[in-house]
Image (spheres, rainbow, N blue to C red):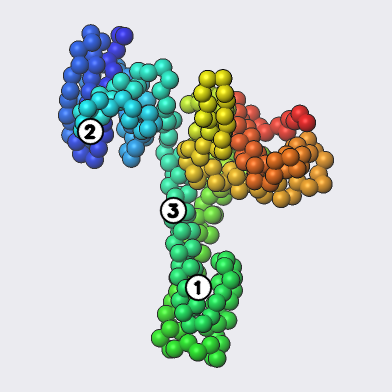
Amino acid sequence: MNRNVVGLDIAKNIFHLYIESADGKPEKKKLKRTEMLPYFANSTVSLIGIEACGGAHYWARELTKLGHEVVLLNARFVKGFVVGNKNDFNDAEAIATAVTRPNKRTVAVKNDAQQDMQMLHRLRQERIGERTALINQIRGFLSERGIVLDKGINKVRALLPVILENIDNALTPMSLELFTELSERVQVIDADIKKHDQRINRLCGENTLSQRFMEVPGIGPITATIMASDIGSGKNYASSRDYAASLGVVPRQHSSGDKQVLLGISKRGNPYLRTLLIHGARAVLAVCSGKTDPLNVWLQALIARRGFNKAAVALANKNARILWAMAIKDQAYEAVPLAA
């Protein structure tokens, strides 16, 4: 080994380093936030391992600019290399050990544009969660007054104004005032979500990879943008199956000896990406009946053989692999005939 290996445990203000120099002599160092970049700017070119967490992508980009090779490691992978009690220096040593392993589980470093997409999606999901909680609260309050509404945001959105305008609904003046405020809050959240959707559509139109992803059946602007942010160049995965496995849409194994046992999907990785892929696949399956192109013929046979839900997961798996292949090869989508 002709370069230093650095395990960097990042935090808000104090950073811990475990350094294995080229001569094999370990060293421990603690730096303040303001000392980080000057220290690495004056140090020899190193292999730096960082556990993927808050702020990791920023530091990976900055250290890469200084000429170092930076690898972001999956936190679950690093956990297995911690020796002794949990402390910052032991964590840094575990990172230094894990980054040199040939089978390390890495995370691709994201640029500013990719993080913009992720931030937008997270804010949108937060508002959707707030709206769902608010709708359920409204339905609960109305049920206490003897008014029962069916499930669904559209049901409440349509019927709540009618209830508030009905003078025979036996609601008190105070409850009418409060329900009116709740209805207005729903409208504000709806407007925020619509604004986020418009931003996603704009980002999708500006991103070449997202535009290509839109050609895949079951992929819309929301899925296309977040998948483009997650995959990037695709070079962080050795194969399309590795990427599908990172999303948890491949079977779990419980095998021993010569007995191979495959279980349900592993559900590892980002649940948001997996949910979008499966929902998109459900939309394709819902309209596949009667179509004669190879993809839909395959889906019809799969539904008949394995059922709707398993067919949806199978298509989500296939789409994940297709998206990775499109990113790594920088090619447009081609509907390849499938085997029966």
Percent across and percent down for residue 277 are 59, 43
Residue identifier under label 2? 86
**Labelled disc at residue 324:** none
Please state which of the two labelled residues, at mark 3 or mark 1, is closer to the viewer.
Answer: 1
Percent across and percent down for residue 61 are 36, 31
- 162 horizontally vs 39: left or right: right
Asked where in the image residue 197 lies, by quadrant, the reply is: bottom right
| Foreground residue among 110 and 140 | 140
The amino acid on which the numbered mark 2 sits, given as a three-letter code, is: Lys
The reply to whether dot 1 and dot 2 touch (C-beta < 8 Å) is no
Mark 3: few, some, or many residues within 10 Å (few <14, many ≥20)? some
| Foreground residue among 330 and 296 | 296
Mark 2: few, some, or many residues within 10 Å (few <14, many ≥20)? few
Whether 300 is drawn above or below 28: the answer is below
**What residue is rendered at 68% in x and 46% in y?**
308
The quadrant of the picture occupied by the N terminus is top left
Asked where in the image residue 239 lies, by quadrant, the reply is: top right
Disc 2, SS: loop
Disc 1, SS: helix
Whether 25 is drawn above or below 144: the answer is above
Q: Answer with mark 3 or mark 2, whichever residue precedes in sequence.
A: 2
Mark 1: few, some, or many residues within 10 Å (few <14, many ≥20)? some
The amino acid on which the numbered mark 1 sits, given as a three-letter code, is: Arg
The amino acid on which the numbered mark 3 sits, given as a three-letter code, is: Leu
Q: Answer with mark 3 or mark 1, whichever residue precedes in sequence.
A: 3
Whether 221 is drawn above or below 50: the answer is below
Percent across and percent down for residue 123 are 44, 53
Residue identifier under label 3? 123
**Labelled disc at residue 139:** 1
- Mark 1–mark 2 distance (CA, rounded to whole Å): 47 Å
The quadrant of the picture occupied by the C terminus is top right
Percent across and percent down for residue 314 are 64, 38
